[in-house]
Amino acid sequence: MGSGSDPIGEELADWGKVVILETRGRVTVAAAIAVVGYVQQDDGSLLVAASDDRTNWSRNLAADPLVRVTREGRTHAYRAALLEGRERNAAIAALILTYGTPAERLGAGPAFRLVPLEE
């Protein structure tokens, strides 16, 4: 990313603690950047969730599911799939267990599975 707009988020992403999502703005169509927590699955997909249904990055993913994810200095393309029911609840529980108390706000917004695209 290297934009300097969120140096702490960039450092945490370099360490693999969070990911940097680059979505396409649903109104502006310009690149939009967000730093979010994630849980990696055995199949290589990533689980992410928003704490509010008005969160811009989640609304962007709902409008255009293609996303670039930067973690540990590498950027890859993914496709977001909205999670519902048991899958959504399991994703939120996994994120809360990973990130602790601050993640307890999760559940009010949507959750997604980010599936890596072939490159």
Image: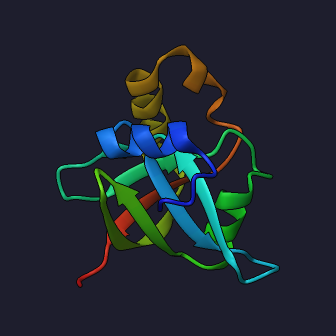
Nearer-the-camera pick, 14 or 114: 14
Q: Is residue 40 left or right of residue 84?
A: left
Q: Is residue 67 left or right of residue 17?
A: right
Which residue is the extreme one toward the top?
A: 101
Nearer-the-camera pick, 73 or 48: 73
Query: Which quadrant of the figure has residue 78?
Result: bottom left
Query: Which quadrant of the figure has residue 24?
Result: bottom right
Give the residue at x 72% y 83%.
29
| Residue 117: x %, y % from top left | 30, 79
Give above or below for 75 relative to 52. below
Q: How many marks?
A: 0
Give the residue at x 47% y 40%.
37
Query: Which quadrant of the figure has residue 84?
Result: bottom right
Q: How is the image coloured?
A: rainbow
Give the residue at x 28% y 50%.
72
Give the residue at x 80% y 52%.
54
Q: Is residue 18 visible?
A: no
Which residue is the extreme one toward the left?
A: 42
| Residue 73: x %, y % from top left | 30, 56
Quarter of the image with the C terminus is bottom left
| Residue 76: x %, y % from top left | 33, 71
Give above or below for 111 relative to 98. below
Q: Is residue 23 visible?
A: yes
